[in-house]
Amino acid sequence: MAPQSHAEASLPPQVTIEETRECDRVGGSGNQAIKPSSIKRFKRTGKRIVKRPPTCKSPFVTQCVKQFPKILHAHRVVADYALAEIGDPSKILCEMYGMYITREEISCLNAGRWVNSVIVAIVSRMMNGQQAPPARTHYFDPSFSVILTNLKTNATSQVIMDRCRMYLDAGILGHDLGTCDMMFIPVCENNHWHVHFVNFAAGRVEILSSLPLRRGNSISAATRRLSMAINKALHAYRIHMDVDVSTFVHVQPHLVQQLNGFDCGILALKFMEFWNGVTLTTSVAEDKLNMYRLQLVVELALNERNTVRDKIMASCHL
């Protein structure tokens, strides 16, 4: 028999050379403990929990969020609160300038709805309030056109002054309309909203409409009569005495046209907001009309003059 090596002689008699080599292969060398080779190791991976946004109570707001994903969260929440179908329809959501808008009334800003006169009236007052004095532009309440239309052709100056006092008296308005170069008068005729715009600097009456109002090559007779009534009312209050509005050139600029029977009110408000007497300072797009509606809901609810603004913000947790 061959003599044993030094390494073999140092092993305990019960451990063979093959067993030792197997232990070295599995457990490693040195003093490390032997680890069974059958153990499997799994990599731990963290999962990110994505919180889904709450379902909107208003189908219209849901539609807007899908169409315009960049709508601010606060605006979505306020619009959803205002237009929620399950809310109290008599709840006042906007109160300013001596007028108020209930949830039922503000629901006219949903898609497919015709804008009512109280919305147009308050927006007109808001536009007047945004101007720095002296005001060069005046936005009338839509009821002014109703008063003018119902004036008789032989009405005396006193009758005209009595009926138009709240619209033309400088003491009530807080400024003199004689300083204004432009006047916007929203008109609802045959269930269609348009704007009768008096441009004193250019000597024109511009009809801002999302539908053609011309009859052949001339403006409608109702538009002519309204211009005559405007001239009488202004002269009764000695406003722009050096001009005759009834003789102004009447034109209808080519503006974006509505594709349905209910968007005329929103477009009329946009025309009032952006028309400068020559063109629209900001383009108005047909595919953004729902966005304009939602923005108007938010603007009415969160306006600083709105006396119930804080209550709305508290209800929306803002």
Image (cartoon, grey):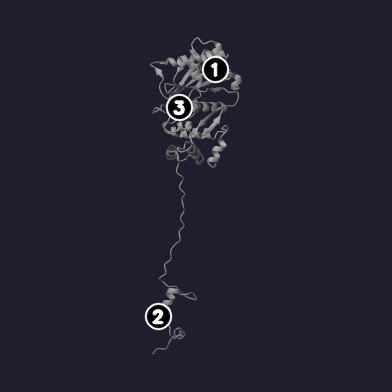
* For discs 1 and 2, the disc positioned in front in the rendered view: 1
Q: CA distance from mark 1 to mark 2?
A: 115 Å
Quarter-wise, where is residue 252 in the image?
A: top left
- Which residue is identified by label 1? 164
> Dot 2, how many residues are within 10 Å of its Cα: few (below 14), some (14-19), or many (20+)?
few
- Which residue is identified by label 2? 18
Amino acid type of the residue tagged 2 in the rendering: Glu
Q: Name which of mark 1 and mark 2 comes first in the sequence.
A: 2
The residue at the point 57 percent across, 37 percent down is 310
Compared to residue 215, the image places residue 7 above or below, namely below
- Which residue is identified by label 3? 265
Q: Position of residue 235 (x, y in %)?
A: 55, 13
Q: CA distance from mark 3 to mark 2?
A: 95 Å
Q: Position of residue 276 (x, y in %)?
A: 51, 24
Amino acid type of the residue tagged 1 in the rendering: Cys
* For discs 1 and 3, the disc positioned in front in the rendered view: 1
Q: Name which of mark 3 and mark 2 comes first in the sequence.
A: 2
Quarter-wise, where is residue 133 in the image?
A: top right
* For discs 3 and 2, the disc positioned in front in the rendered view: 3
The residue at the point 47 percent across, 27 percent down is 116
Residue 143 seen in the current view: yes
